[in-house]
Amino acid sequence: MKVGFIGVGNMGGPMCRNIIRNTNHDVVVFDLNPAAISACTDLGASAGTSVAQVASTCDVVFTSLPMPRNVEEVALGAGGIADSVKPGMVYIDLSTNSPATARRVNEGMRAKGIQMLEAPVSGGVPRATDGTIVIMVGGDAAAFDAQLPLLKSFSGEVVHVGEIGMGSVAKLVNNMLAFCNAAAAAEALMIGAMAGIDLHKLQQVISNASGNSSAFRNISDKAFKREFQASFALNLAHKDLRLALELADELGVPGMIAPQVMNLMRIARAKGMGDDDSSSVIRVYEQALGREVRP
Ligand code: NAD
């Protein structure tokens, strides 16, 4: 089978490389960044020349793209996937979108006879790299069953959560929770730093106590090592939380916590941290207090 992969950045890159390593499929990659393409062709993929060329030659096409507008453009725009389809092709979007975007793209694909699965992922670059990423899939159950072996080739946990749109719901709800955990962890660590506790000891305690979370471990590790180069860009996290808040608004669910976290992200972006890692929210506290959270 021929598998196309469009968008091989921080997340798409390692997921694509696991397909190359773990299957016998021919993989064709396309990205606007030549270095991202090389990191996959070095492992045996071939370089596509355009979205249209990938879509017209592959049986399954993945996208992993930053913003919903990038997905709509690549999927439905002029020279996009729907324009260039090979009959019987399946389209799988791994990006984080709103449920409304996923449904709209699905309608555009269906009009061209293309089956679509939305398959947002969670676990960040480390789990995309070691092949344990979680995939939450929305779409037709038979299409899901047919693509399960391919999805399992780069994931530790693939869950069919319902019809198109429900994958995005699961993803936005998960990320809202993770960002709230991260903001709470930043605030807690700042209190610890100001109190003068040994931060390694505090991390050891919390990692084994009731305050633990993957967000806590991630933000404490990054702050202690001063590693704020984007593994998951703040701009992408801000997009996810904005979509989650829009979904909450559509459903009439009040926000007590997430809007506060949104403001924290807005301040971090206003300070020029948008292209840095999303863990940079802790630097808003650090700058306010003139002290870094590091042992
Ligand atoms: P990224 O910016 O590192 O990678 C995106 C890639 O898409 C880049 O290499 C870029 O050059 C390419 N691209 C953009 N527009 C394109 C186009 N028109 N045609 C071809 N290539 C194009 O972003 P990422 O962190 O890999 O995130 C990708 C998606 O995964 C986003 O929707 C994000 O919200 C989601 N996500 C990210 C993480 C994470 O930890 N980074 C975790 C879960 C989900």
Image (spheres, rainbow, N blue to C red):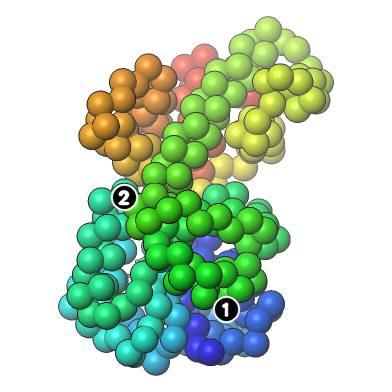
* Residue that label 1 marks: 40
Residue 260 in picture, x, y percent from top left:
38, 21
Residue 61 in picture, x, y percent from top left:
42, 78
Residue 196 in picture, x, y percent from top left:
72, 10
Q: Counting other residues with Cα less than 10 Å from the Cα at mark 1, is it few (<14), some (14-19), or many (20 or more)?
A: many
Sequence-wise, the earlier of marks 1 and 2 is 1
Q: Residue at x 58, y 58 (%)?
A: 158
Q: Counting other residues with Cα less than 10 Å from the Cα at mark 2, is it few (<14), some (14-19), or many (20 or more)?
A: many
Q: Are marks 1 and 2 in contact (CB under 8 Å)?
A: no
Which numbered marker is on residue 192?
A: none
Of residues 207 and 107, the one drawn nearer to the viewer in this rendering: 107
Of residues 128 and 136, the one drawn nearer to the viewer in this rendering: 136
Q: Residue at x 63, y 67 (%)?
A: 152
Whether the residue under disc 2 has CB within 8 Å of ligand 1: no
Residue 217 shows up from this direction: yes
Disc 2, SS? helix
* Residue that label 2 marks: 99
Q: Quadrant of the C terminus?
A: top right
Residue 123 in picture, x, y percent from top left:
60, 49
Give the quarter the ligand 1 occupies: bottom left
Q: Is residue 71 left or right of residue 27?
A: left
State the residue lying farthest toward the front.
Answer: 142
Label 1 and label 2: CA atoms lie apart by 30 Å
227 shown above or below 101: above
Picture quadrant of residue 195: top right
246 shown above or below 3: above
**Type of the residue with mark 1:** Cys
Residue 242 shows up from this direction: no
Camera-nearest label, 1 or 2: 2
State the residue lying farthest toward the top.
Answer: 195
Number of callouts in the render?
2
